[in-house]
Image (cartoon, helix red, strand yellow):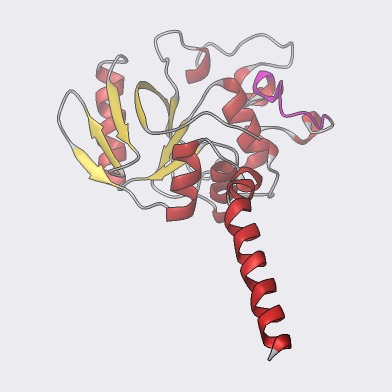
Amino acid sequence: MKREKVNFIKSSIVPLPISNIDTDQIIPARFLKATDRNGFGDNLFRDWRFDENNNPENNFPLNNPKYKGTILLAGENFGCGSSREHAAWALFDYGFRVVIAPSFADIFKENALNNGLLPIELSQELCNSILNETKQDPSTELEINLENQSVRVIVSGEQEYFKINAYKKSCLQNGLDDLDYLIQLRPDIEQFEKAQKKEVIATNEI
């Protein structure tokens, strides 16, 4: 499935500095019946965003109008719990394109990368600094350069580099999923097959 290309992102931050946020908190199990990826954002953090009467919880950051942007800043071990891919779907459908945290659950991190969502691990120190800047000024923005694998806090100039799998990086930069990537290789595969057939024919003629 063709995706948005991810190369350079400049955005303010939505802070959610809670550790061990699991996938059932990101998208509760009762909303997993749909198979289409669209619409999951409506129920992102459903039990935190709304009370039992479906009224918005005013204290929850996603309901606070002063916090906007495509970057979610979370606590350590984000995305732990069950391996549901719907968690990445919900975050992306809501409008997030980047999740920053000191650490991620491995399966969530892989699901995010497979669905066009960029998970970035930064030091706890920089995460704390970003959080403090955002609390003081909700319009604080980050610059994310995927080519350089860097995150920069615009107001302070603080910068840190992050790691990412080279293949996943290329897919994000080119807006490709795994199937798109394989389709792009089709000419090379066909050329290789032709060369192999010629080699077999030449061997048989000897």
**Name of the residue lying farthest toward the right:** 33
**Name of the residue lying farthest toward the front:** 205
Residue 121 or 48: which is nearer the viewer? 121
- On the picture, is 102 further left or further right than 168? left
Q: Residue 86, how many percent across, how many down?
A: 69, 37
Q: Residue at x 48, y 53 (%)?
A: 167
**Name of the residue lying farthest toward the left:** 157
Q: Quadrant of residue 165?
A: bottom left
Q: Is residue 141 magenta?
A: no
Viewer can see residue 82: yes
**How many numbered marks, from 0 up?**
0
Q: Is residue 142 above or below residue 172?
A: above
Q: Residue 135, how many percent across, how many down?
A: 30, 21
Magenta-drawn stretch, dominant element (helix, strand or loop): loop
Q: Residue at x 72, y 29 (%)?
A: 37
Q: Residue at x 67, y 8 (%)?
A: 55
- On the picture, is 190 further left or further right than 131? right
The N terminus - image quarter: top right
The C terminus - image quarter: bottom right
Q: Is residue 146 above or below residue 43?
A: below
Q: Residue 150, how many percent across, how many down?
A: 28, 41
Q: Is residue 195 above or below residue 152?
A: below
Q: Residue at x 51, y 18 (%)?
A: 62
The magenta span reads 34-42
Q: Residue 162, how many percent across, how many down?
A: 32, 48
